[in-house]
Image (spheres, rainbow, N blue to C red):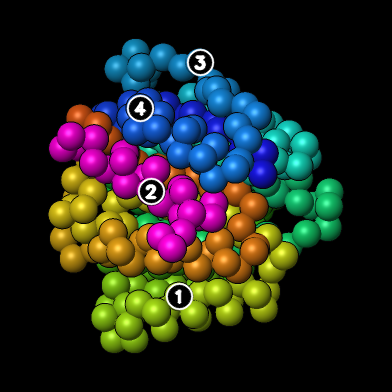
Amino acid sequence: MNIHILEMPLDFGASRHGSDMGPSAIRLAGIKERLESLGHKTVRYFSPIQINPQEYEEPGNPKAKYLQPIVRANTQLASEVQQAVEDGGFPLVLGGDHSIALGSLAGLAAAYQKKGLRMGVLYVDAHGDFNTAETSPSGNIHGECMSASCGYGIPELTNLYFEGRKVDPRNVCYVGLRSVDMEERKLMKEAGVTAYTMSDIDRMGFCDVVRKVIGFFKRRVDVVHVSFDMDCLDPMYAPGTGYQLPAGMTNREALLLMEEMYESKLVRSAEIVEVNPVLDVRNQTAALAVELAARLLGEKIY
C-alpha cells in the first residue's frame, strides 16, 4: 500500500501546548521504518503547513480560539488528503491536536463524494469533541471538530474546504468515551452518533464492543476513517497527552481494536493525535502510536 504520511504540528486547538511536537516524536519513534517493514511504501512524508507558534498569534473569538490559523492549516491539509486518496494512497495524518480532524475529514469527504462512496468514522477518544461555539466551556476548537464535520457549529468550521457537512453523524462510531459535557451529550444524541463508553466496555466486554463496531460499519459504509486520540488510553500507558484522565483503555485493548479494524478491510485512512512529548515519559506514548499504526496497517504478533 502507498502511504502518505502528513505531519500536522498544530496545537492551536487545545489549551496545553506541546502537541505540535507530536509528529516529530512519532517520526523519531520509527513510524516510517515500521510501516515499510510491513511491505508498505511511503510515497510522501512531509508537513503541508507552515505555521507560527501559538504564542505569536492572537486567540480572537473566545468561543472558537485561533479560528483563522486553524481554518488555514486545515484547508491545506484537506487538499493534501484529497489528493492522496485520488492518487490511490492511504493518508496517515500525525497530530497535533484533534482539530486536525477538520482537515482530514473535509479532504476525505471531497474525494469520496466524487467516487460515490459512503464514509464512516471510527472516533477513538475519551471526549466527544461535539461541542459548538455556543456550548463549549473552553472555546478550544479541538472540542468542536467532530460536530463541525457533522454540520453543527459556526460556518467557518462547517463549511471548511467546501460548503456543507463532511460526514453523516449516523455513520460515526465512538469508542472509549469517558468525559462528555452535558450540552455536548444532548447534541450527540440528537445527531444520531453511535457511542461505546468505557462503562459500556466494562458491562459488555471489549471483544463484544469490537464486534459491534465492525458490524456497524459493515452495514452502513464503504470506507472507514480511523481518528485515534491518544487520550483514550489510560495515562498508565500513554502519559504523553494533554488530558490525562484515569480509567481509560489499556494498550492491549487499543491494539486489538486496530487489528480488528484492519481485518474489516474497510479502513482507507487514519489520523493519530494528541501526542504531547512535553508530558511524555521516554517517548513511550509516541512509541505506542507507532504500534497502533502498525496494527491498523496489518502487523500481527504471529
Question: Is residue 96 rendered to the left or right of residue 154?
Answer: left
Q: Is residue 35 above or below residue 60?
A: below
Q: Which is more N-terminal, label 2 or label 4? A: 4
Please identify the quarter of the rendering in which residue 63 is found: top left
Q: Find disc 2 in the rendering and name its residue.
A: 291
Q: Position of residue 17 (x, y in %)?
A: 26, 29
Q: Which amino acid, by three-letter code, is at mark 2?
A: Glu
Q: Which is more N-terminal, label 4 or label 3? A: 4
Instruction: Determine contact: label 3, label 2, CB under 8 Å.
Output: no
The number of numbered badges drawn on the structure is 4
Please identify the quarter of the rendering in which residue 283 is found: top left
Q: Secondary structure at mark 4?
A: helix
Q: Find disc 4 in the rendering and name its residue.
A: 28
Q: Quadrant of the C terminus?
A: bottom left
Q: Which is more N-terminal, label 3 or label 1? A: 3
Q: Which is more N-terminal, label 1 or label 4? A: 4
Q: Which is more N-terminal, label 2 or label 1? A: 1
Question: Is residue 108 rendered to the left or right of residue 144?
Answer: right
